[in-house]
Protein backbone atom coordinates (compact mmCIF):
# COMPACT_ATOMS: atom_id res chain seq x y z
CA UNK A 1 0.00 0.00 0.00
CA UNK A 2 2.80 2.44 0.85
CA UNK A 3 4.33 1.78 -2.56
CA UNK A 4 1.01 2.72 -4.18
CA UNK A 5 1.12 6.04 -2.34
CA UNK A 6 4.71 6.65 -3.43
CA UNK A 7 3.86 5.90 -7.04
CA UNK A 8 0.78 8.14 -7.02
CA UNK A 9 2.95 11.14 -7.87
CA UNK A 10 4.49 9.26 -10.81
CA UNK A 11 1.05 8.24 -12.09
CA UNK A 12 -0.28 11.76 -11.57
CA UNK A 13 2.54 13.19 -13.70
CA UNK A 14 1.92 10.52 -16.34
CA UNK A 15 -1.81 11.32 -16.39
CA UNK A 16 -1.20 15.08 -16.64
CA UNK A 17 1.23 14.57 -19.53
CA UNK A 18 -1.25 12.34 -21.35
CA UNK A 19 -4.03 14.88 -20.76
CA UNK A 20 -1.89 17.67 -22.23
CA UNK A 21 -1.05 15.50 -25.24
CA UNK A 22 -4.70 14.65 -25.89
CA UNK A 23 -5.77 18.28 -25.52
CA UNK A 24 -3.08 19.32 -28.00
CA UNK A 25 -4.20 16.66 -30.48
CA UNK A 26 -7.79 17.82 -30.09
CA UNK A 27 -6.87 21.42 -30.89
CA UNK A 28 -4.79 20.32 -33.88
CA UNK A 29 -7.64 18.27 -35.34
CA UNK A 30 -10.27 21.01 -35.06
CA UNK A 31 -9.86 21.85 -38.76
CA UNK A 32 -10.93 18.34 -39.80
CA UNK A 33 -14.17 18.56 -37.78
CA UNK A 34 -15.45 21.71 -39.49
CA UNK A 35 -18.59 21.35 -41.62
CA UNK A 36 -17.93 20.14 -45.15
CA UNK A 37 -18.68 22.86 -47.65
CA UNK A 38 -20.01 22.19 -51.12
CA UNK A 39 -17.32 23.28 -53.56
CA UNK A 40 -18.67 23.55 -57.10
CA UNK A 41 -15.13 23.87 -58.46
CA UNK A 42 -14.04 20.58 -56.93
CA UNK A 43 -14.15 17.18 -58.62
CA UNK A 44 -17.67 16.59 -57.37
CA UNK A 45 -19.63 14.18 -55.29
CA UNK A 46 -16.75 11.77 -54.55
CA UNK A 47 -14.47 14.45 -53.17
CA UNK A 48 -17.30 15.74 -50.95
CA UNK A 49 -18.02 12.20 -49.75
CA UNK A 50 -14.33 11.76 -48.98
CA UNK A 51 -14.31 15.03 -47.03
CA UNK A 52 -17.42 13.94 -45.12
CA UNK A 53 -15.79 10.60 -44.28
CA UNK A 54 -12.68 12.40 -43.00
CA UNK A 55 -14.93 14.65 -40.93
CA UNK A 56 -16.74 11.64 -39.43
CA UNK A 57 -13.42 9.98 -38.55
CA UNK A 58 -12.18 13.23 -36.97
CA UNK A 59 -15.40 13.46 -34.93
CA UNK A 60 -14.98 9.87 -33.72
CA UNK A 61 -11.37 10.55 -32.72
CA UNK A 62 -12.45 13.72 -30.88
CA UNK A 63 -15.07 11.73 -28.94
CA UNK A 64 -12.42 9.14 -28.03
CA UNK A 65 -10.02 11.85 -26.86
CA UNK A 66 -12.75 13.52 -24.77
CA UNK A 67 -13.63 10.16 -23.22
CA UNK A 68 -9.96 9.57 -22.37
CA UNK A 69 -9.66 13.07 -20.89
CA UNK A 70 -12.71 12.38 -18.70
CA UNK A 71 -11.12 9.09 -17.54
CA UNK A 72 -7.87 10.95 -16.79
CA UNK A 73 -9.74 13.61 -14.80
CA UNK A 74 -11.51 10.87 -12.82
CA UNK A 75 -8.17 9.16 -12.07
CA UNK A 76 -6.63 12.46 -10.95
CA UNK A 77 -9.61 13.03 -8.67
CA UNK A 78 -9.14 9.55 -7.18
CA UNK A 79 -5.48 10.40 -6.53
CA UNK A 80 -6.48 13.63 -4.75
CA UNK A 81 -9.04 11.78 -2.63
CA UNK A 82 -6.68 8.92 -1.76
CA UNK A 83 -8.86 6.40 -3.59
CA UNK A 84 -6.50 5.76 -6.49
CA UNK A 85 -5.34 2.21 -7.10
CA UNK A 86 -8.34 0.50 -5.50
CA UNK A 87 -10.71 -1.60 -7.60
CA UNK A 88 -14.11 0.08 -7.83
CA UNK A 89 -15.80 -3.32 -8.08
CA UNK A 90 -14.23 -5.49 -5.37
CA UNK A 91 -12.28 -2.93 -3.34
CA UNK A 92 -8.93 -4.75 -3.64
CA UNK A 93 -5.68 -3.06 -4.67
CA UNK A 94 -5.07 -2.88 -8.41
CA UNK A 95 -1.70 -4.38 -9.35
CA UNK A 96 1.09 -1.83 -9.83
CA UNK A 97 1.95 -3.37 -13.21
CA UNK A 98 -1.61 -2.77 -14.40
CA UNK A 99 -1.51 0.86 -13.27
CA UNK A 100 1.87 1.31 -14.95
CA UNK A 101 0.30 0.21 -18.23
CA UNK A 102 -3.01 2.04 -17.75
CA UNK A 103 -3.09 4.53 -14.88
CA UNK A 104 -6.75 5.20 -15.70
CA UNK A 105 -7.71 1.61 -14.77
CA UNK A 106 -10.58 1.41 -12.31
CA UNK A 107 -10.71 -2.36 -11.85
CA UNK A 108 -8.29 -5.09 -10.86
CA UNK A 109 -7.50 -7.68 -13.53
CA UNK A 110 -9.94 -10.21 -12.03
CA UNK A 111 -12.91 -7.84 -12.13
CA UNK A 112 -11.96 -6.44 -15.54
CA UNK A 113 -12.03 -9.89 -17.20
Image (cartoon, rainbow, N blue to C red):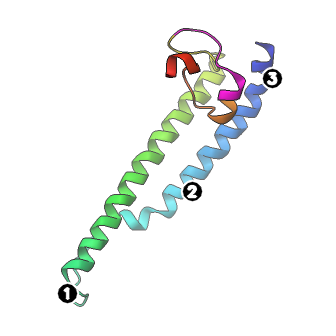
- Relative side of 62 to 76, left or right: left
* Left or right of 100, for residue 23: left
On the image, the x and y values in percent for residue 59 come to: 36, 55
Q: Earlier in the sequence, mark 3 or mark 2?
A: 3
Q: CA distance from mark 1 to mark 2?
A: 33 Å
- Judging depth in this view, the residue of 91 and 83 nearest the camera is 91
Tell me the distance, in whole angstroms, between the alpha carbons under discs 3 and 2. 29 Å
* Camera sees residue 34: no
User: Residue 42, percent across and down?
Assistant: 26, 87
Asked if residue 15 is positioned above or below residue 95 in the image, the reply reads below
Q: Position of residue 79 (x, y in %)?
A: 65, 23
Residue 101 at x, y = what percent?
Answer: 66, 35
Q: Residue at x 39, y 59 (%)?
A: 58
Q: Give the Cα separation between the discs numbered 1 and 3.
A: 61 Å
Give the camera-side residue of 90 and 84. Answer: 90
Labelled disc at residue 40? 1
Q: Which residues are magenta?
A: 90-98
Chain-order first, disc 1 or disc 3: 3
In the current view of this chain or complex, which residue is farthest to the bottom? 41
Taking the image as shown, residue 99 lies to the left or right of residue 9, namely left
Which dot marks residue 6? 3
Residue at left offset 50%, top offset 12% = 89
Q: Which residue is mark 2?
A: 24
Overall secondary structure of the magenta stretch?
A: loop
Amino acid sequence: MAEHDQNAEKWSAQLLALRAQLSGEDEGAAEWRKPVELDQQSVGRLSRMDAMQQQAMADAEARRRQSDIARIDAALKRIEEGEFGWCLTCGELIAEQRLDIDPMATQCISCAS
